[in-house]
Image: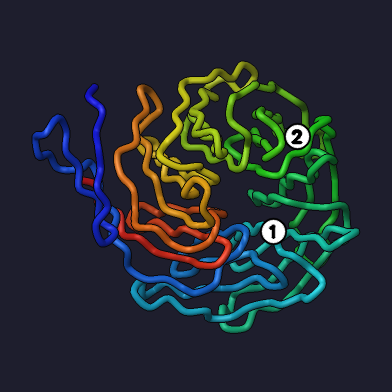
Amino acid sequence: MKRVAGIVFAGIVLWGCGGKEEGPPLTLTQKGGLAFGGNHLAAQGNYLYVATEHKLSVIDVSSVSTPREAGKYENVNVIFQDVSVKGTTAFTVGYNATLGAIFAIDVANPESPILIGWLLTRDLWGIHVDGNYAYVAAGDSGLFVYNVTNPAGMSKIASLNLGADVQEIWKSGNYVYLTGPFEQKLWAIDVSTPTSPILADTLALSVSGEDVHIYGNTAVVSGPQGVAFVDISNPSSMSLISTLKPSGDPYAAWFDGEYAFTATKVTGQGRSFIAVVEGPSAPREVASSSIIDGSPRDIVYDGNFCYILSSSQTFIYQVVKN
């Protein structure tokens, strides 16, 4: 396959191949944004939920050209690190200098989020809620599992120490997958019995785990060294499919089965953009967005729009596949 070259103009990528004009496989067009960033975000319906320093923000994106902060829950003692939404409850994790905590926040009224439950514990970094359970990447403590059936009375029901510092997590089927920015590995944990998690496999990678996202039988792990596509069709025997270093340092990714949308740092600068990598076999970078200020933190793609979060800004790009 011929290598392609791209030019970014006003948020839309124009592509050519071998001097012959050719339409891009997709285009990214900037629609709107907000002048604050955060650590991680989640999307549900017309709202984004942004975990940032001292607050969980609820962003109304019903108008992508004029997003607005609808409401927020604030706690000056906590750096909110990640968020996962189940129905009308946002579960968020954070920490201060000595402790970590998991919070349950009622967002049924997005204009007025209300704290309905919390639990102190060790440092918590990443969270994925599925059903009645919250699965948490707890740094050097490994995996924590919480029963959140009653958000006002959450309880820790299991843990699994992996002997590593895990900070990013995603659940798919009966397995959770963990990685961390100080690790070049992906862990698969069997949680078919949530009270008794079992290590299924560990895969060494050449990419540090700043993020992990899963679609079908493919996991995407991203870090400044590049994007790794991993076959997880058999979680007990994961295997590397391919790795690609795009034009920048990817820190977060969202995979839709065809493209990995990555929140990527301009190398050597505190600025970010979206680099789109086609994969998983024979991966290649096929598109990129305009550049925004701040270091990349997270990204979500919902089939129509890409939401990129940096340390200082949040931007929305429309995605059109050609």
Circle 2 residue? 193
Judge the density around disc 2: few (<14), some (14-19), many (≥20) Cα neighbours within 10 Å: few
Badge 2 marks a residue whose secondary structure is: loop
Q: Is residue 292 above or below residue 178?
A: below
Q: Position of residue 300 (x, y in %)?
A: 47, 54
Q: Position of residue 168 (x, y in %)?
A: 66, 43
For the residues marked 2 and 1, what is the alpha-carbon distance in whole angstroms?
A: 27 Å
Report the residue at 20% width, 48% height from top: 14
Mark with earlier residue (2, 1) = 1
Foreground residue, 36 or 159? Answer: 36
Circle 1 residue? 81
Report the residue at 75% width, 56% height from top: 148
Q: Is residue 154 left or right of residue 305?
A: right
Q: Is residue 111 left or right of residue 91?
A: left
**Do the residues under discs 2 and 1 have CB atoms within 8 angstroms?**
no
Foreground residue, 134 or 183? Answer: 183
